[in-house]
Amino acid sequence: MATITDLVRPDNYRRFEREVPRWYTDAKLGVFVHWGPYSVPAWAEPIGELGTIDDGYWFTHNPYAEWYFNTIRIAGSPAAEHHREAYGDAPYDDFLDAWDASAFDPAELLALVKSTGAGYFVPTTKHHDGVTLWDAPGTGDRNTVARGPRRDLVAAFERATREAGLRFGVYYSGGLDWHVSQLPPITAEGDAFVRPVDAGYAEYAHAQVADLIDRYAPDVLWNDIDWPDAGKPSGPFSAESLFERFYAANPEGVTNDRWGATHWDYRTSEYQQDTEVERSGAWENCRGIGYSFGYNSLEDESHLLSGPAAVTTFVDIVSRGGNLLLNIGLTASGTVPELQRRTLEHLAAWNAVNGDAVFGSTPLDTAIAGPSETPWLRWTRTGETANAFVDAAGEVRLPASAAVDAASARLADGNPVAATRDGDAIVLTLPRPELAGPTLVRFGLRG
């Protein structure tokens, strides 16, 4: 996946500009799911996070398991060698037929998602391999209704999400489709990043996204990579017509910024944080619990966010005004891998205690109190309360202006904690938390 940082809305898209609905900015946390034929081989080299690896090395050794179809077509890549040894150069579509989803329980999955406090859920409906998780127009039998799981998985996700009381989103790869376009594998960024841009593909993708809108009325329309260039000017198969359709079906819907220079409600970053798109307006950071979005059987605990690390990642993002879209890569049978489940369960347990100072909060003005790394400290604001999240125990100094009332300090359970002011800092002694992660200390704000 990729994000575009320098976008200017053309005139024909400016009419869609509006204030981002409150439900989205209050939600703070969403859960992403990548699931497809790539979950059968579940293989990628866990070389590191996006943004930390040179592009020339990245694509040949791609840690994104959902890019398996691309990586095995790169001559000499370790993935190609693995595929030859494990599957004898079998065609990628054999994985669609081998994908049985026999243990998939959407209600159980959404119960886990809801327990984290997440406000929205976004599964993939078509990734770059072109396989759709519903009987999408133009796909013939290359979808999960006709083959593999033999089920409309998008409908199953949508129903369970609504029943759990969460907002429902759909991920769609508008920028890439390796099956329909039959372009050579991508081996680098820049001019070598080949994507379909023609009118035929624009019409094909338009029909599928329109069908998603008509069938499922999603709250989040999450496009990836870009939109085919031929579908950007006004016309019956344009992104413009899709936005008209989307907002008519769901006036409180939101869409991301991965449509190229067209329209967006919020910006997106991926793995790496504090990027330019996070400076203003509504934004969302997305990442896998590990280095991959699709399930990668080669990943172990050293490659994954631990529960406490997921908590600090989440709190940091919220303290700066963003949302976190945290991804699960389901196994081929439809279960949450155990290590990923542990991370989600820890995040859920921490949010159950501290979440009311995170969900629905706003960033605290840094003129009142700002973040620090020693101790690790982040702030949010709820009404007239400043919420400090401190990842330390024992005596700590929290930089804070006189507007933060030291005498009002109390822990998440409401018990007071002794705190004194020492110039431009508050000094207090914190207990070691029962649950690993930052300790919440609430302070009243003076006028």
Image (cartoon, helix red, strand yellow):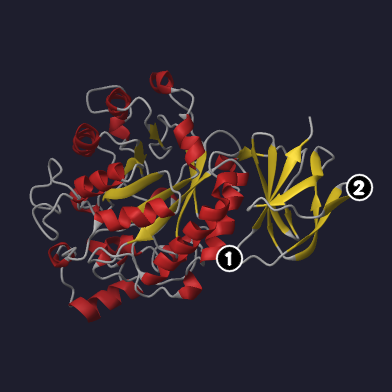
Left or right: 326 as drawn, with respect to 52: left
Which amino acid, by three-letter code, is at mark 1? Leu
Camera-side residue: 345 or 2?
Answer: 345
* Residue 52 visible at all: no
* Residue 252 visible at all: yes
Residue 155, picture quadrant: top left
Dot 2 surroundings within 10 Å: few (below 14), some, or many (20 or more)?
A: few
Camera-side residue: 316 or 208?
Answer: 316
Q: Which residue is mark 1?
A: 435
Residue 105 disc label: none
Residue 435, picture quadrant: bottom right
Q: In this rendering, is residue 14 above or below 197? A: above
Q: Which residue is mark 2?
A: 423
Which amino acid, by three-letter code, is at mark 2? Gly
Q: List the single residue furthest toward the front.
A: 415
Dot 1 surroundings within 10 Å: few (below 14), some, or many (20 or more)?
A: few
